[in-house]
Amino acid sequence: MSLSKEEIGQIRHETEKIKSTIGKTIEKPKSNKKLILLSIISVAFLLIVGGIGFSYMNSKKPGPLDNFAKCLTENGAVMYGATWCKYTQGQKAMFGNSIKFVDYRDFTKNPEVKITPTWFFEGEKYENAQSLDKLAAITGCVIG
């Protein structure tokens, strides 16, 4: 039993239909990949913007040591340090957000500074990081 030319033509036509349908089906995931990539980028952007916003709002909150830091500055205490110095970073971290009220200067602006951080108060020099209690004792400022 052999197929006629018409039957062979119909089978070829049906095969071509199936191939074109399969080709269309395969193309659709490409647009899904674009949608997934766009979604991931959007979520990452929102997380970054949210993180920046949270950080900004957090930096504007009053710190628990704001009054203490202001008192140090008002009484003339000056902290000299270096941005690359881990001890200066540690001293700054003790103040948290309140560091913005401390009179902080770069160590290169004072030739007397040999060690960072160094505090100056009423002509006296206090080298290395100082505890908050010691700073309170030498300046008369109240912690808190």
Image: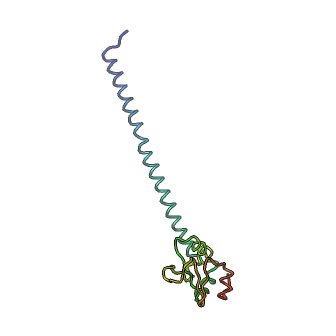
Residue drawn at x 47%, y 56% is 42
Image location of residue 60, percent across then percent down: 55, 76
- Quarter where residue 143 is shown: bottom right
- What is the x, y in percent for residue 134? 68, 82
* Residue 52: x %, y % from top left: 51, 67
Q: Is 141 left or right of 31, judged from the image as shown?
A: right
Residue 119 falls left or right of residue 38: right
Color style of the picture: rainbow
For the residue pair 107 and 2, the one nearer the viewer reads as: 107
Instruction: Report the number of numbered marks.
Output: 0
Residue at the extreme top:
1
Q: Nearer the viewer, residue 140 or 111?
A: 111
Is residue 6 shown above or below 69?
Answer: above
Please tell me which residue lies in front, 83 or 125: 125
- The structure residue drawn at horizontal position 63% and vertical position 83%, both measured from the top left corner, is 68
Quarter holding the C terminus is bottom right
| 77 relative to 1 in the view: left or right | right
Residue 82 is situated, as x and y percent measured from the top left of the image, at: 52, 75
**Residue at x 41%, y 45% (from the top left corner):** 31
- Looking at the image, which residue is at 67% across and 84% down? 136
Q: Quadrant of the N terminus?
A: top left
Nearest the camera: 84 or 49?
A: 84
